[in-house]
Amino acid sequence: MYLSKMQIVGTACRNPYEIHRALWELFPENTEDKRDFLFRVERTDSHRAEILMQSVRKPEKSSPNVQSIESRAYLLTLHEGQRLRFLLVSNPIRTISDEKGRKSATGDPKKCRVPLIRDEDQKGWLVRKFDECASLETLIVDRKTPFYFRKDKEDRFGKIQPVIFQGVLNVREPETFVCLIRKGIGPAKAFGCGLLSLARG
């Protein structure tokens, strides 16, 4: 994997989904049309956004929206019992059945994602995500500014309430933990959620 830092400039820097589209432009054509990167907006203003990106492939192409790129190989060498500091911007949710009783395309009851609002629910969500591979030693939870978006197909608006998790964890199952890091944690990855950053504790 690779870790890259870059700056997105222009109108694309004002919208997380447009940032996601600009990052796609940094990679060669992917015939499977499958995203293999995660990103997080570190800082932003009306003119530029500083981005941290984790990717399977090294970004190779240029884009008019990207001002600079610094990339390095990201080698995850973890061991059982390792103590690490972490930072995660994620979108803790729970899935419920549609209140109006609508059906999906397959005829099954339609599901809806509902954000978790209370601190204890958000903490419990993260504990469950780490359950098979790590345990939390300390945890601080803060909210970020929400993202608003429009679903064109359904002609309705949506909202994502990102949460900043940070603290200290202990690795229990290194291989499972690496798989979780590669995959990302939780939904809304196209909006800059799910990237887990680690540092020595």
Image (cartoon, rainbow, N blue to C red):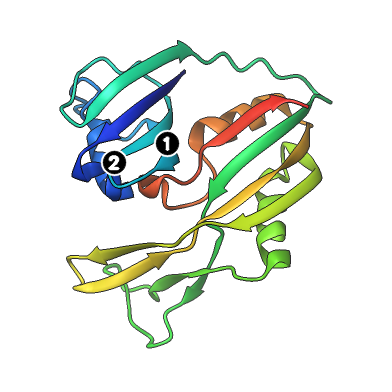
Q: Residues within 10 Å of mark 1 (few under 14, many from 20)?
A: many
Q: Amino acid at mark 2?
A: Ile
| Left/right of residue 75 with respect to residue 156 in the rendered view | right
- Identify the residue under disc 2: 19
- Choose between 173 and 200: the one closer to the eye: 200
Q: How many marks?
A: 2
Q: Determine whether label 2 and label 1 are within 8 Å by CB.
A: yes
Q: Is residue 135 above or below residue 146?
A: above
| Left/right of residue 130 with respect to residue 193 in the rendered view | right
Estimate the x, y position of residue 34 in percent, counting from the top left: 29, 35
Q: Residues within 10 Å of mark 2 (few under 14, many from 20)?
A: many
Estimate the x, y position of residue 112 in percent, counting from the top left: 43, 72
Determine the residue positioned at 20% across, 20% down: 28
Q: Secondary structure at mark 1?
A: strand
- Choose between 181 and 109: the one closer to the eye: 181
Determine the residue positioned at 50% across, 56% down: 162
Q: Amino acid at mark 1?
A: Phe
Which of the marked residues, 2 or 1, is nearer the chain's N terminus?
2
Residue 181 sits in quarter: top right
- Identify the residue under disc 1: 39
Disc 2 from disc 1: Cα separation: 9 Å
Determine the residue positioned at 61% across, 27% down: 178
- Choose between 69 and 154: the one closer to the eye: 69
| Left/right of residue 182 with respect to residue 23 in the rendered view | right
Determine the residue positioned at 31% across, 18% down: 59
| Image mark for residue 156 | none
Q: Is residue 47 above or below residue 29?
A: below
Estimate the x, y position of residue 16 in percent, counting from the top left: 33, 48
* Quadrant into which the C terminus falls: top right
Q: Secondary structure at mark 2?
A: helix
| Left/right of residue 56 with respect to residue 201 in the rendered view | left
Estimate the x, y position of residue 64 in percent, counting from the top left: 15, 27
